[in-house]
Image (cartoon, grey):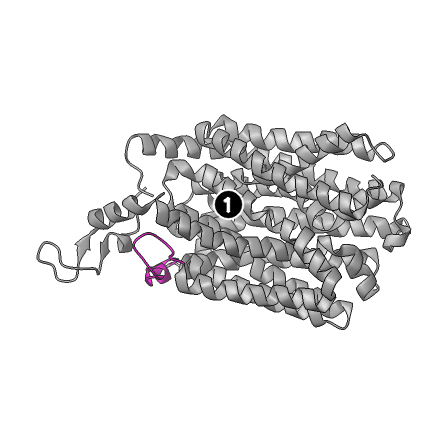
């Protein structure tokens, strides 16, 4: 696949007697020299700071879910809506975020996302009623939507293609350590200073990150700022661009991969993990935090393993990751939800390992997307795939809350072992739908992947 015509000639100097121009080969060599080097890791690290903040904001409601229920005097359904609306906004913002990313680049979007999340956390800090807090979470979701796909796009620009599966995995899973920030220091700060001060402090930190990203992040090698060429993308218009991205089987396959593997982990870490562990497994709050924290570490381990497999075996290895992770989650949850708690340690530990594999398995979605789309449409296609997990997670979040209310467990004091286990069965319809969608899209996607790697081997591919 050849780069866009606008990328072939740059206004950067004098070459072959043409004032103000050099050819693409010189620029390509300069970029290739920087790809995967020290500067690439510095740019990636700065983007990761923004993503860590996004994950901390996203999971702050899970770590403080019981406090939120008491603070706003809410039912289980209303408590679910805090996270449901955030995830729903995150999902519907993915296409606009992808279009903005292709036009303005990662630097501007990561900075803007941090500003929006800071505003949402600040609104949550001082909201006098639950409905205002729900709006605050929606604002957090809109900012969160800009961050991850921007980080993935940045990785694609700064690292060589064969290193991308591992770097994508590391981006997603090291970012998940932001959940530890909400589980430990954020909860500690809330216990020390109170609800308002803790969320206001989070808002202030986000503004500082936004300024640093805007000042120091470079979208791609050879540029200190976005150079304006991104604005030339999507020349055919928004809807034709969306149609082009959606027609690629790898884009839709990526959507179903993300849809299938994200929601169980999100449910545990974003809202219902602590209530489940307190009610069914009889954990203390400290034990529940340690359990979820261990899951985050497991995610990072799975990320390295899956990244290597996806890079070395891009055809069958990726599909094996998706089927293996989702199958393990379904089996382990069935063992837990069909028997009364507390369960033996070996079972809860194995469940944690299976659920923790979901996020890294979902990262395969972006490998399929990258291998099926042109670079000028990559942000939009990534956004479409990233919608999958957001939609499934938001459905599960709300579904668990509704099923609890239907059983009369409308507040944390009314949660029971049986009610919680029944509510968590809401996951199974989504696994079935997701796996069917993935199986239908996989054959055509694998054909596209084979063509891509054949082009790379033959030297016909320029990323």
**Of all residues shown, which one is farthest toward the left?**
17
> Is 429 a magenta residue?
no
Q: Which residues are magenta?
A: 217-234
> Is 222 a magenta residue?
yes
Judge left or right: residue 280 versus residue 372: right
Image-quadrant location for residue 437: top right
Residue drawn where x is 58% and y is 56% of the image:
54
* Residue 197 shows in this picture: yes
**Of all residues shown, which one is farthest toward the front?**
192
What's the magenta bit mostly, secondary-structure-wise? loop
Q: Is residue 362 above or below residue 387?
A: above
Image-quadrant location for residue 218: bottom left
Residue marked by disc 1: 171
Residue drawn where x is 54% and y is 67% of the image:
207
**Residue 103 or residue 160, whichever sits in front:** 160
Q: Is residue 450 above or below residue 180?
A: above
Q: Is residue 440 above or below residue 274?
A: above
Q: Residues within 10 Å of mark 1 (few under 14, many from 20)?
A: many
Judge left or right: residue 10 versus residue 167: left
In percent of width and height, residue 438 lies at 58, 36
The quarter of the image holding the N terminus is top left
**Residue 261 or residue 309, whichever sits in front:** 309
* Residue 378 shows in this picture: no
In percent of width and height, residue 60 lies at 68, 56
Judge left or right: residue 282 versus residue 223: right
Residue drawn where x is 72% and y is 59% of the image:
82
In percent of width and height, residue 389 lies at 62, 46
The quarter of the image holding the C terminus is top left
């Amino acid at each position: 696949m050849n780069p866009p015509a606008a990328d072939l000639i740059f206004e950067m100097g004098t070459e072959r007697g043409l004032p103000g121009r050099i050819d693409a080969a010189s620029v390509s060599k300069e970029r290739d020299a920087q790809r995967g080097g020290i500067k690439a890791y510095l740019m990636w690290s700065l983007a990761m700071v923004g993503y860590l903040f996004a994950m901390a904001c996203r999971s702050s409601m899970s770590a403080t879910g019981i406090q939120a229920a008491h603070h706003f005097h809410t039912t289980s359904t209303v408590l679910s809506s805090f996270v449901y609306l955030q995830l729903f906004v995150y999902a519907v913002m993915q296409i606009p975020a992808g279009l903005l990313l292709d036009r303005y680049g990662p630097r501007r979007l990561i900075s803007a996302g941090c500003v929006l999340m800071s505003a949402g956390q600040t609104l949550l800090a001082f909201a006098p009623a639950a409905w205002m807090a729900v709006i605050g979470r929606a604002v957090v979701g809109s900012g969160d939507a800009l961050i991850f796909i921007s980080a993935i796009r940045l990785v694609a620009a700064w690292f060589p293609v064969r290193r991308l599966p591992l770097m994508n995995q590391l981006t997603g899973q090291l970012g998940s350590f932001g959940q530890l920030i909400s589980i430990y220091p954020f909860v500690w700060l809330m216990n020390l200073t109170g609800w308002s001060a803790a969320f206001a402090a989070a808002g202030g930190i986000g503004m500082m990150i936004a300024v640093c990203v805007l000042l120091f992040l470079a979208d791609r090698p050879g540029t200190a700022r976005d150079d304006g060429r991104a604005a030339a993308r999507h020349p055919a218009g928004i809807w034709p661009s969306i149609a082009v991205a959606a027609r690629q089987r790898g884009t839709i396959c990526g959507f179903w991969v993300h849809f299938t593997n994200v929601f169980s982990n999100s449910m545990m870490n974003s809202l219902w993990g602590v209530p489940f562990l307190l009610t069914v497994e009889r954990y203390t709050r400290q034990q529940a935090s340690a359990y979820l924290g261990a899951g985050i570490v497991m995610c990072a381990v799975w990320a390295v393993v899956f990244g290597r497999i996806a890079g070395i075996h891009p055809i069958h290895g990726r599909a094996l990751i998706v089927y293996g992770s989702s199958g393990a989650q379904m089996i382990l949850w069935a063992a837990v939800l069909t028997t009364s708690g507390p369960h033996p340690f070996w079972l809860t530990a194995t469940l944690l390992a299976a659920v923790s594999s979901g996020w890294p398995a979902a990262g395969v979605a972006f490998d399929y997307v990258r291998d099926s789309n042109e670079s000028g449409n990559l942000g939009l296609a990534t956004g479409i795939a990233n919608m999958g997990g957001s939609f499934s997670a938001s459905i599960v979040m709300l579904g668990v809350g509704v099923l609890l209310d239907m059983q009369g467990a409308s507040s944390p004091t009314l949660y029971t072992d049986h009610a919680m286990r029944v509510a968590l069965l809401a996951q199974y319809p989504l696994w079935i739908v997701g796996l069917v969608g993935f199986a239908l899209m996989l054959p055509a996607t694998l054909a596209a992947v084979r063509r891509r790697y054949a082009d790379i081997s033959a030297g016909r591919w320029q990323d």
